Image (cartoon, grey):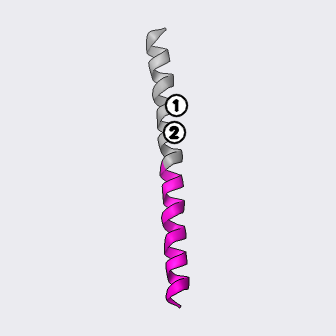
Amino acid sequence: MKTLFALIVSSLVLMGCNTMEGIGKDVKKAGEAVENAARK
C-alpha cells in the first residue's frame, strides 16, 4: 500500500514539473513576440 501511494505521489510531482516547464516555454515565446513587435 505504501509503495502504491509513493508511486502515485511521484507521478503527480513529475507531471507538475512537466506542466511548469511547458508554461515557462509558452511565457518565453510570448515575451519574444512582444519584444519583436516593440523592435518594429
Vertical placement of 12 versus 21: above or below?
below
Q: Which residues are magenta?
A: 1-20
Residue at mark 1 to residue at mark 2: CA–CA distance: 6 Å
Queried whether the magenta region covers residue 17, the answer comes back as yes
Q: Position of residue 6 (x, y in %)?
A: 49, 79
Queried whether the magenta region covers residue 30, the answer comes back as no
Q: Residue at x 49, y 16 (%)?
A: 36
Residue occupied by mark 1: 29
Q: Residue furthest front?
A: 3
Label 2 sits on a secondary structure element that is helix
Q: Position of residue 35 (x, y in %)?
A: 44, 19
Please state which amino acid type lies under the numbered disc 2: Lys
Q: Main secondary structure of the magenta part?
A: helix
Q: Crowding near pointer 1: few (<14 within 10 Å), some, many (20+)? A: few
Q: Residue furthest top?
A: 40
Q: Residue at x 52, y 31 (%)?
A: 29
Q: Residue at x 51, y 68 (%)?
A: 12
Q: Crowding near pointer 2: few (<14 within 10 Å), some, many (20+)? A: few
Vertical placement of 40 versus 32: above or below?
above
Q: Residue at x 52, y 38 (%)?
A: 26
Task: Check contact, mark 1 vs mark 2: CB within 8 A.
Answer: yes
Mark identifier at residue 25: 2
